[in-house]
Amino acid sequence: MTPSTLRRLRSTSPRRSSPRATHPRSKARSFVFRFDQLAEVKRSARTWDEVKALLGGKGANLAEMTRLGLPVPPGFTVTTEACRAFLRSGNWPRGLWEEEVAALRELEGRTGKRFGDASNPLLVSCRSGAKFSMPGMMDTVLNIGLNGETVKGLARLTGDARFAWDAYRRLIQMYGTVVMGIRDEPFEQLLAEWRARRGVENDADLRAEDLRTIAGRFREIVREQAGREFPDDPLEQLRLATEAVFRSWQGKRAQDYRKAAGIPDDLGTAVNIVVMVFGNMGKGSATGVATTRNVSTGENELEGDYLLNAQGEDVVAGIRATQPIAQLAEEMPEAFAELKRIARLLEKHYREVQDIEFTVERGVLWMLQTRDAKRTARAAVQIAVDLVKEKLITREEAVLRVTPEHVDFFLHPQFDPESMRAARADRRHLASGLNVSPGAAVGQLAFDADTAERWAKEKKAVVMIRAETKPDDVHGMLAARGILTSRGGRTSHAALVARQFGKPAVVGVMALEVDPEKREAILKRSSTVLREGDWVSIDGTTGEVFLGQVETMQPSLEDPALIELLGWADRFRRLGVWANADYPRDAERARGLGAEGIGLCRTEHMFFETERLPLVQTLILSRSEEERGEVLRQLLPLQRADFEGLFRAMDGQPVTIRLIDPPLHEFLPAHDALLREVTELETRQELGSETTPSEAATLELKRRMLETVERLREMNPMLGLRGVRLGIHMPGLVRMQVRAIFEAACKVAEAGVRVFPKIMIPLVTHGNELRWEQKALEEEARAVMAERKRKIRYRFGTMIEIPRAALTADEIASLAQFFSFGTNDLTQTTFGISRDDAETSFLAEYLTAGILPENPFDHLDEAGVGRLMQMAVDLGRKTRPGLDIGICGEHGGDPKSIAFCHRLNLDYVSCSPFRVPVARLAAAHAALRERQAKPAGRR
Ligand code: PEP
Ligand code: MG
């Protein structure tokens, strides 16, 4: 457009919507809406969500910006409904093309330009835009309307032949690749040849005549590769470009992206037809992308990149080195000031950080897009907290805007500073680039996405290296531990995608020259060569790249914004968050991360320690009560010390100690190994070789062990002599454990520690088991308290891990003072599958075939296991109102399962210490979502 037309359009206020303007079809909703027809759209799409579903995010926001009076070039949106209809039948739905042409004629009327008119040509772009943003995953074609005639008109009108021929060659290249399916390489190769011939670095430095010749050659490439001519008719260009954008919804890269981002496949994309504005009309023009805050750190400053004299795709593709946005203040102060003002306004309007695209055409600013900005976990937390302080959002909204994955990210590995120092000292620091997605990644270099994906499937750690990534590379990016590119900026494709999926990424490492053909990357200044399969370590937090493997470590969760946000989350949640911890140091860590109790201490873990295992083995091998008694006496002080440590660490909070659970053979050597040893020793003896007294003793011991192992051997040990059964079978052992718990409790209580032990009996199936076991154990507890003359507050309870326990929970609750769902066992016993074997065998097949929608060991199976849990809660609380109920299976740390536990009205979830912050947030989400779902009056 010429500047005068532009100014006229910018100054006209959005016109009133006229429903007739776009060729209304009788009753059905129109397929096409102009940007200034938002009011019309809202008649059938009532919520903003529905507007976005119909117009796509980009279309909806362009219409909204138009409504706000911001400088948006005129245009219209072809709805997602039209796309779905097209994809269903493979044909244009009736009336769609007529509506599109009518809307185009409107644009002609508004701009005073005509499509295909060489004297004053109208040019448009055709841009995809689905409900949920899928950056770069679908197609866009710019400069539609140019042909051999109109290009001359454009040159004449703008007085800039170089610009006009450049726009034309771009159309042929984009149209050729996107619409006609030609590879990009022949076009890029020709451009590279011309750059070399003219001795210039950038396409922008090629001359008008060069570009004219290139455009001619591009047309030949189209003819050779596609077997047909590049279409000169602008209407045909528009029609086929619209179709191509519709189809790009079904493209592999879009499908891969949707799968990873959990976007449904049946939404379709909208198509936006927008009057072209040009950032490549000489030095007074520019194009760029920006976010209203820094989306890596959350800092409140406009952040982004731009290029002078360039078109949109140049910035995002990362082919030319971009300028930081602050520089625009010097080069184009007026446009920059307006951009800043609009950025603030948009942030206030949407109450969210925005990601914007803009173009400056001969000094005049145009807004081409706004959308909620993707951000790193760190930025997500910082921004949520800041927006509350700026009174733009509530604390509830802030908590809901941070995802469990964001919190989890704070727990991602970082490089160990020592190992990093060593790497530097060894001169393994190779280069630096832009730190666009934080976290440390160590892996072997893969030079393309397919290799990265294949290696990851083979369980290799992979870092994918590319010159720059394209949307086709997404499957490799998802499979890799980290991403490394030699080109591109903060808003490049690689950066956006990596950030969204929390992959560490370093981009724009200019010192590297990547050659995907030779599968090597050369470090320009030192000529070090990196080959496929070489190990590298990349730091997405600092942008550094190291050769070899740098050790990683967990970061601290000391981020003040995170602490504040989790503090808010704590006030909203109803579920308590406890931790599974066996040792005092784990308990301390869990408490530091916000745990409010220990929900599971697996005491057998203490028995596996090196100095204790022989004692436990002797206990199992003992033949007489005296022998057993002697070993238990030795074990008692050790257990007591364990519990003292736990009680001290959790001063004032409940500590749930589970009595020994696993089958006894787990404490003994494997049968086959033992048999081999015994046979060897026996053979040596038989062959008459000298046997030392110690060898004779060993043989005796091993024989006894073998006998015991054979006696204890079970076909299905997970369903065998374990849990409460073991306690009943070997009463001395659990009595010793209870004695240790109470002796420890009395001792620390004397020292002023507030103790609250909860003794948990595992794997109960029948009320009588508890009757038997609990009575004996309570006697022991009372005995210790009498000896020590101290009263300890305590509870005896049970795990619900077997369907029968859930089904008879009313009876069980008459004895147990608390329940804890052991959903690891409850899942295996409900499904009748082995938790140790299934996941590596048929369960994987089930998941691939979709026979099971998800792994029941990852997310609680609500329909089956969940139903049993519901029953147990209802029956248990019928007998004992207010019965304390928690969960300590692995599901206690899974956000989806946590939401289910909230709905079941459990008292707490218990998970591993490092999941505690995630669980605190997930529990708050569950409570807030429940509040949102209830009608206002009933809250
Ligand atoms: C369970 O079964 O869910 C549980 C917590 O116990 P374990 O995993 O130790 O069997
Ligand atoms: Mg269990």
Image (tube, helix red, strand yellow):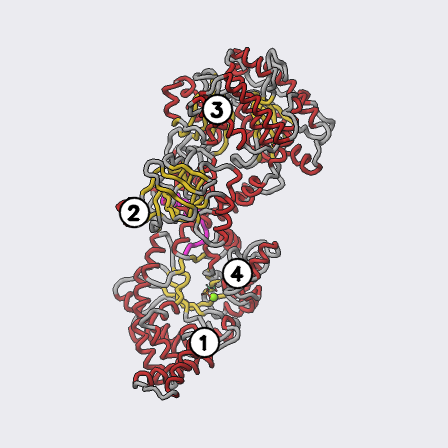
Q: Earlier in the sequence, mark 1 or mark 3?
A: 3
Magenta region, residue range: 563-578
Circle 2 Cα neighbour tier, 10 Å, few/some/many (<14 / 14–19 / ≥20):
many
Res 302 quadrant in image: top left
Q: Main secondary structure of the magenta part?
A: helix
Question: Disc 1 vs disc 4: Cβ atoms closer than 8 Å?
Answer: no
| Image location of residue 12, percent across then percent down | 55, 15
Please give the name of the residue rendered at 50% of the width and 21% of the height, measured from the top-left corner.
70
Q: Earlier in the sequence, mark 2 or mark 3?
A: 3
Q: Kindly report the distance in space between the C-alpha atoms of the residues bearing marks 1 and 4.
A: 25 Å
Q: What residue does disc 2 label?
A: 423
SS at circle 2: helix
Amino acid residing under circle 1: Asp
Please give the name of the residue rendered at 69% of the width and 28% of the height, measured from the top-left corner.
96
Q: Earlier in the sequence, mark 2 or mark 4?
A: 2
SS at circle 1: helix
Question: Disc 2 vs disc 1: Cβ atoms closer than 8 Å?
Answer: no
Q: Kindly report the distance in space between the C-alpha atoms of the residues bearing marks 2 and 1.
A: 45 Å
Is 566 colored magenta in this rendering? yes
Q: What residue does disc 4 label?
A: 839
Q: What residue does disc 3 label?
A: 194
Q: Which residue occupies the foreground of this view, 327 or 926? A: 327
Question: Disc 4 vs disc 3: Cβ atoms closer than 8 Å?
Answer: no
Question: Disc 1 vs disc 3: Cβ atoms closer than 8 Å?
Answer: no
Amino acid residing under circle 2: Ala
Q: What residue does disc 1 label?
A: 672
Is 140 colored magenta in this rendering? no
Circle 3 Cα neighbour tier, 10 Å, few/some/many (<14 / 14–19 / ≥20):
some
Q: Which residue occupies the foreground of this view, 715 or 440? A: 440
